Amino acid sequence: MMNALEKRGTFSLAGIYAFRMLGLFMILPVFAIYAQDLKHVTPALMGLALGAYGLTMAVLQIPFGILSDRLGRKPVIAFGLVLFAIGSVVAAMSDDIWGVIIGRALQGSGAIAAVVMALLTDFTREEERTKSMAILGVSIGASFVLALMIGPVFEAWIGVSGLFWLTAALAVVGLVILFSLVPNPQGHMRPQKSPSILKDLYRIAANPELLRLDIGIMVQHAMMMAMFTALPFILLDVLHLSKSEQAWFYVIVLMSSVLFMGPMVMAAERKGKMKIIFLGSIALLITGELVLGFFQSSMYIVGFGLLLFFIGFNVLEACLPSLISRIAPSESKGAAMGVYSSSQFFGAFLGGALGGLCYGAWGAQALFLICAVVALAWLVMASNMSPPKRHFNKK
């Protein structure tokens, strides 16, 4: 059972991460339509604006993780939140697609995901770490679901530029939580010098189980980001849903996905069904993409396809950090989290950039079917994964 320090650290860090992800994802359901009114916009640049944060996050995750080993976790997290806020302000004040791209890239330059995960491992015991990582993973999934539900609602009140201003405010809330609630780890051992870091990175990159998970999170986020380069236009132009109707559409689909997500995560974590739940969730992504690719004229069928996709997505989002924490060597967890986070956000960049190109060239159906094929390749690769070891709490 987690002690008071572990509970406080876990939930406060989960709050910081959730607020940050909430700000990033609120624009997903509404940005593609909003971007049509920006200067110099094209489908490719619209996709690039959606995914630009992923490139800078992917590039800077490992350097930020290494920097946090030397300067301390909290100062690096604070610096990242400030950069995130600055990027949000730049995007909010831009009426040109290039200004939004720069703002989103600045948001991503506050690359604190790996540092947050490393700090979490600093003050949790080994037997409680999987639980803490699962809580963090659930908070990420929950923030994503909430962002998609409230994004259209808030956009109707304050517009997309207002969403960017709100995102800057959420970064400030994260700073308050960091310095008022997040505890300081006791007895944190500083890592060794650069050669050992390079050795750690090589060991992680050469681990086939970790590599499978890293590729998986990249594919998952690429699919999600690519989907939102086309989905808003289907809801508006094909299904003729107004902004308020789209908000309710997302609420119903995503709340329904959460009802399925909880039991599946519990079965994976507590009943030793991780591998079958993991593979089943990838299969749900594939099925959802196929439904969206072949059936776009019915609101109910599109909703069913999205429901399948988001059940799989949310379960994987909750389980993947836990799997990384189990498999990574204890002395290299910070580096493992850095590689994992870099893969995740590089996938978001690829999905936005390539999704926008694909949608502009071939249309929505081709985009969804390409995503299904990529996910099928992931399923084949993941089928060889070793069932993860279960951890039991010490009495």
Image: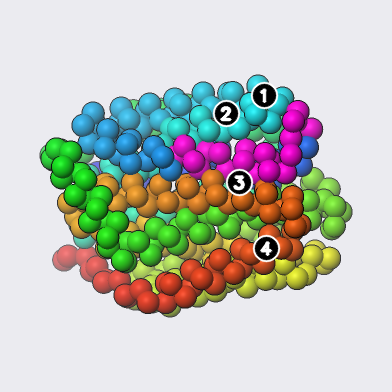
Give amino acid for label 1.
Ser
**Dot 3 crowding, Cα within 10 Å, few <14, some 14–19, many 20+:** many
- Do residues under tags 1 and 2 come within 8 Å of each other at their CB atoms? yes
The location of residue 348, given as percent across then percent down, is 53, 48
Mark number, residue 94:
1
Give amino acid for label 3.
Ala
How far apart, in angstroms, are the residues tagged by discs 4 and 1?
Answer: 30 Å
How far apart, in angstroms, are the residues tagged by discs 2 and 3?
Answer: 16 Å
State the residue position of label 4.
368
The residue at the point 85 percent across, 57 percent down is 238
- Quarter in which the N terminus is drawn: bottom left
SS class of the residue under badge 2?
helix
Residue 283 against residue 259 in the figure, above or below: below
Q: Which residues are magenta?
A: 37-57
State the residue position of label 2.
103
Residue toward you, 208 or 111: 208
- Quarter in which the C terminus is drawn: bottom left
Q: Earlier in the sequence, mark 4 or mark 1?
A: 1
The location of residue 247, given as percent across then percent down, is 73, 49
State the residue position of label 3.
353
Q: Earlier in the sequence, mark 3 or mark 4?
A: 3
SS class of the residue under badge 3?
helix
How far apart, in angstroms, are the residues tagged by discs 3 and 4?
Answer: 15 Å
SS class of the residue under badge 4?
helix
The answer to whether residue 332 is left or right of residue 106 is left
How far apart, in angstroms, are the residues tagged by discs 3 and 1?
Answer: 20 Å
Q: Main secondary structure of the magenta part?
A: helix
The location of residue 252, given as percent across then percent down, is 69, 59
**Dot 1 crowding, Cα within 10 Å, few <14, some 14–19, many 20+:** some
Give amino acid for label 4.
Phe
Q: In which quarter of the view is residue 235 placed?
A: bottom right
Mark number, residue 133:
none
